[in-house]
Image (cartoon, grey):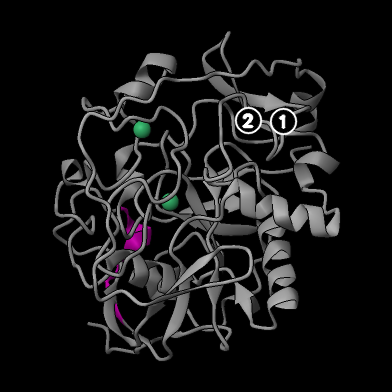
Amino acid sequence: MPLTMSIRMAGLLCAPLAVCSAALSGCSERDSLVTVPVAAAVVIQNELPPHVEFAENSIGIKLVRLPAGEFLMGASESDGEARPDEKPQHRVRIEHPFEMGMHEVTLGQFRRFVEATNFKTLAEEDGGGYAYDSTTQRLSLNHDSSWKSTGFEQSDDHPVINICWHDAVAFCKWLTQVEGQSYRLPTEAEWEYACRAGTTTPWSTGAAFDTVQGSGNICDSNLNAVYPFAKWTVAWSDGYAFTAPVGYFRPNAFGLYDMHGNVFEWCSDPWLLRDYAGNTIEDPDEKPEQGSRVVRGGSYLSLTTFTRSTDRVGLVDTMRNGIVGFRVVRSAFPNSAVAIKEPRP
Ligand SMILES: [Ca+2]
Ligand SMILES: [Ca+2]
C-alpha cells in the first residue's frame, strides 16, 4: 500500500516520487557521490539591497524583517502558465510584520539540530530518501540516503534535503525552544508575499522565465549534462547541476535568496487540491485535510513553471526527496495573513 503519494507532480522529478513498500524492497544500494564542476556563466551580483534589515540567531540563521502590507495572491488571468488552483487572484492582507529566513535552512544548520537532539529524520527511521544515481543518471530511492547522503556533493551551506514536513516542523520546534522565540514554517500566503516582494509578474524578476537567470538555481545546462532525462532544462548555465550554496544568486527586493529554485520549500498549509475560491487561508494548521502539504518555489530539477511565484504543489507530508527543503519564519503570531473577502461576480 502506498505510504505516500504525490499530487500534480508532473515534471517535478524524473524518478517516481511515491515511496511505497514495493519500491523499498526493490531498492538497491547506489550511493556514488557525484561532483560536478562549478562554472558559473555569469558574474552574479548578489548583494543585499541596502534597505534590508535582518537579525541573526544563535545557529546563524539570518532573519529578514518583512513589513505588514497587502498583495494580490494567486495568478493573474494574463499568466498563460497558471493552473486553476492558482486562481482566482485575491487580495490578502499581511496583518503583522514577520521575519523570514533569508535563506533556505542549510545542511550545517540542520546538523546543529541533530547534534543537539539526536533527532532522526523519517528517511533515517523508515526506508531512506532519494539520492542521485550516476549509473541511471537520475534521483532514485535509496535505503541509505538521508539528509546526510544525497549522491552529490553538498557543503554545509547547501540547503538541507530529504526532509519531510514533520522533520521541518521538528526543527522549528527545537529552534523555538533554544531561542525562546516562536519559529514555524511560513503559510502559503506569507511565502507568496515574500517571494513576490512587491512584484506582480509571474517571477519576481519579470514576466518570462529567462529573467530568472542570475537570480536562481534552476534546471540549467549543467543539470542536463548529468541528468539527460531532464529535457526541460534551459540553455544557459547557472553553475550548478544540483543544489547550490544558499545566497549565491541575486536576492529579491525583500532581501530573500533562492525563492525561485534551488529547492522547493515546505509551507504549513495542508494541500486542498482546489482553487482559492473554495478556500480560506486563515489558520492553516486547523484545516481538516491533514496528510499533504504545500511546497513552493520550484527546484534545480523541476520545470521552470514550478519556479513561478504563484505555483502550488501538494506533497504528502511524509515525502522526502532530493528537491524539497524549507525555510523558517520567526513570528509571535501563528499566521500573519488574512484573506480579504471580496464580493465574487
Ligand atoms: Ca542549476
Ligand atoms: Ca527555494
Residue pointed to by mark 1:
145
Mark 2 is surrounded, within 10 Å at the Cα level, by few (under 14), some (14 to 19) or many (20 or more) other residues, namely many
Residue at 46% x, 58% y: name it.
103
Q: Assess whether residue 89 is covered by the magenta stretch.
A: yes
- Amino acid found under the numbered disc labelled 1: Ser
Residue 206 coordinates in the image, percent (x, y): 15, 54
Q: Which residues are magenta?
A: 83-91
Three-letter amino acid code at disc 2? Thr
In the shown orientation, is residue 250 left or right of residue 246?
Answer: left
Q: Are marks 1 and 2 in contact (CB under 8 Å)?
A: yes
SS category of the residue bearing label 1: loop
- Residue 154 among magenta residues: no
Horizontal and vertical percent for residue 90? 29, 77
For label 1, being within 8 Å of ligand 2 is answered no
Q: Earlier in the sequence, mark 1 or mark 2?
A: 1
Q: Quadrant of residue 330?
A: bottom right
Quarter of the figure with the N terminus: top right
Q: Which mark is residue 150?
A: 2
Q: Quadrant of the C terminus?
A: bottom left
**Residue 39 picture quarter:** top left
Q: Position of residue 254 (x, y in %)?
A: 30, 70
Q: Note whether 166 is above or below 287 in the view shown.
A: above
Task: Report the front residue among 265 and 159.
Answer: 159
Q: Secondary structure at mark 2?
A: loop
Measuring 71% from the left and 36% from the top, which residue is drawn there?
146
Q: Is mark 2 within 8 Å of ligand 1?
A: no
**Residue 23 in sight from this viewpoint:** yes
Q: Position of residue 29 (x, y in %)?
A: 76, 16
Q: CA distance from mark 1 to mark 2?
A: 6 Å
Few, some or many residues within 10 Å of mark 1 (<14, 14–19, 20+): many
Left or right of 91, for residue 228: right
Q: Is residue 282 left or right of residue 39?
A: right
